[in-house]
Amino acid sequence: MKLLSLLLPLSMGMYFHMPPGHKKCIKEEIHKDVVVTGEFEAKESPGHRVDLKVTDSKDHILYQKENAETGKFAFTTDDQDLFEVCFTSVRLGGFSQDPKSHEIKLVIKKGVEAKSYDEQAKTEKLKPLEVELRRLEDLSESIVNDFQYMKTREEQMRDTNESTNSRVLYFSIFSMCCLIGLASWQVLYLRKFFQSKKLID
């Protein structure tokens, strides 16, 4: 059951409706040196077509297709980044009284799930058991890398928390010193003022 829960994030499939003239994007953060593949199918609406664009956080175009009725895309990540898959409904010439919503199907696979072990089996002449062992080896490596990434993120978050706590502590001490200094100055000023008015000795 635990192994299944770790496998689920490697593949993402979805089916949704998009109104004509609108845009829908799916974002996902992916680690460095990960193979990502996608398969899509988008049904046109009368008077509209669907365009597809895959970009990273720096707006580099990794894949782009106009009139994306069906197709596949693949890329390998150079660095850990936030990737975006956008479907855009573009109006064509003419007028449609009752345009229907686009039906869009998208399946994204990454890491072990995106690799083609059938091709490796053919080129390296591997037996079915060897292919399965290769797949399990890659899966184990992927899980270890994920745990290492989570450990690194946990260390970064702990360092950030400790740094924030120390800054808050120093700011609190500084604020208290300022308040004590201001209160002392007010007392001395008021005492001097009342003494000058001969209200107190």
Image: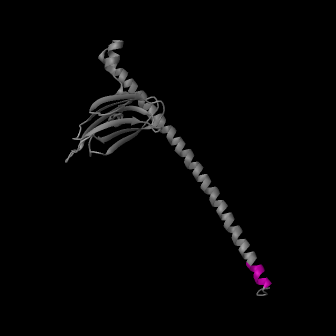
Q: How many marks?
A: 0
Type of colouring: one colour
State the residue lying farthest toward the bottom: 199
Residue 199: where, in percent of width, then height? Answer: 76, 87
As drawn, is 197 to the left or to the right of 157? right
As drawn, is 41 to the left or to the right of 164? left
- Residue drawn at x 54%, y 45% is 158
Q: Give, as a single range, the part of the protein colored magenta.
A: 190-196
Residue 7: where, in percent of width, then height? Answer: 34, 33
* Residue 1 seen in the current view: no
Residue 185: where, in percent of width, then height? Answer: 73, 72
Residue 96: where, in percent of width, then height? Answer: 21, 45
State the residue lying farthest toward the top: 125
- Residue drawn at x 32%, y 41% is 88
State the residue lying farthest toward the left: 98
* Towards the viewer: 46 or 25: 46
- Residue drawn at x 30%, y 41% is 90
Q: Is residue 75 above or below residue 150?
A: above
Q: Is residue 142 magenta?
A: no
**Quadrant housing residue 170:** bottom right
As drawn, is 152 to the left or to the right of 62? right
Pick the quarter of the image with the N terminus: top left
Q: Is residue 194 magenta?
A: yes
As drawn, is 64 to the left or to the right of 154? left
Q: Is residue 164 above or below residue 93?
A: below
Q: Is residue 73 above or below residue 96?
A: above
Q: Main secondary structure of the magenta part?
A: helix
Pick the quarter of the image with the C terminus: bottom right
